Image: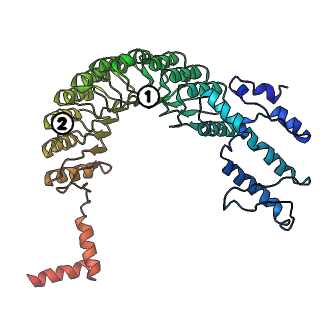
Amino acid sequence: MRSSRAKNKHPFFTIFPRIKIGRKSKRWAEEIYVFPQSRAVSEKNLLINLNRILDTYDEDLKSDEVIVENATLKTGKTIHRLDRKDRHQEVQDACRIHDMSLRETFLKSCEHVGIPPLAMTYFLDRMASADTELIMRNLGIGPTGAVAVADALARNKSVTQLDLSLNNIQGKGAAAVAKLLEVNSLINDVNLSENNIGKDGAEALGNMLTVNDSLVRIDLSRNGLTDDDIQFFSNVLQTEDSLSVLDLSHNSFGITGGEYLGEMIGNNTSLRELNLGWNRLGDEGVKQICTGLKENRTLEKLDLSWNEIGHEGASSVAESLENNGKILELNLNNNRITDRGMEKIARSLELNETLKVVKIGYNLVTVEGACALLRSLLKNSGSAVEEVRMAEVEVNSDIRELYFRLKIRKPRFNLLELSTASGDFYHFVKPQNPMNVLEDYLKRNKLTFRQCQSIEEEDD
């Protein structure tokens, strides 16, 4: 049988020395590495934890003068004397595990691998607890720290979700994560947003996708990626068959990037959700995206918000909706779509029978465009639309009438985020059933229907 020492042998672990302690615990020191117990970097937290253990043994010994020098942590630092030979073994072990003499060694080890002490403490805690989710967002680990984390996770058997967002790991760190994902088939969700990974990082991740068949979701948003940076990555995705969720929002893709991504969408058969919001695609870039969308039969959720889409781009979206029978949710918020573009989209929805959610708020749409969309939904008896969001469109009587007609036909339909004349969100109030109103009136006046009729006859 292999010893625990052999199991733990890994380049990342060798930087942590083992404790040299007394005779009674020599066996423990040979089998257990120090770093799983190194979570008490803060001396104050260490003492609080130690005091909690000691309190369980001090209840009946409060009068003993050799037990404690300072009995509380409420003011300043408290240090327990552990010179009693009859202390319970758990107390002695706690003292040795959290020996503050290891502080300097721990800090030097953190400096060696490039990970701040707080991040290292958190990382080691998570590794020791065998959590499936490792979230290390905004811990300042940088490229070198990302390499160390990736090295430690290479043989990990518990983590399935990895979040290294906002750590400035750059291309070097992204390449290390890519190498990790080539050998670790358990991790299926990775967040590398806000890391400035650049072209090198994007290409390393693209190479990884050629051999990895377990990754389901990856977030590369807010990395400042350009058209040139995404070319190789999008080419690889044309034949990718496992990745289902991709977030490329808040980057800098333009027309050329739209061409690369449009070609990828047309050939990809695995993506279910694609976020391209907050880019610079414009009408021409969106046109390329929509060309690919006509051929795609798997994508269900597409976000094109904040992409400077105008009338021409809206026309391209409308044309793709007529030919695509798979998209369930479309986000066109915060663009430059006018009533003219809305009318194009409305006509396409007279034919589409799959789209369920439409978000088209914060555009240049007025009541006229909103009514055109609602009328198209009334015309299409097979429409699947259940939710429309049109923020900053002021509600009027025509919109209310069309909404209630749709609501009668489709009780699950919702029209959200319209505004009042004062700018507040408008909430539709369901009109009361006339028969219910009559019944309520009779109850309040303690009348029957016959009595009501007799009153009417007297009035005549």
Q: Is residue 291 above or below residue 55?
A: above
Give the percent coordinates (x, y) of residue 233. 42, 18
Q: Amino acid at mark 1?
A: Leu
Element type at marker 2?
A: helix
Residue drawn at (66%, 62%), measured in percent from left and top?
74
Q: Is residue 362 above or below residue 249?
A: below
Q: Is residue 288 above or below residue 353?
A: above
Give the percent coordinates (x, y) of residue 246. 43, 28
Disc 2 or 1, which lies upstream in sequence?
Answer: 1
Give the percent coordinates (x, y) of residue 262. 32, 20
Q: Which one is nearer the viewer's eye here, 236 or 385?
A: 236
Judging by the rendered image, the residue that carries numbered circle 1 is 220
Q: Could you classify mark 2 by the number of other residues whose Cα lies within 10 Å: few (under 14), some (14-19), or many (20 or more)?
A: many
Q: Which one is nearer the viewer's eye here, 322 or 200?
A: 200
Residue 427 in view of the camera:
yes
Whole-Å distance between the Cαs marked 2 and 1?
Answer: 31 Å
Judging by the rendered image, the residue that carries numbered circle 2 is 342
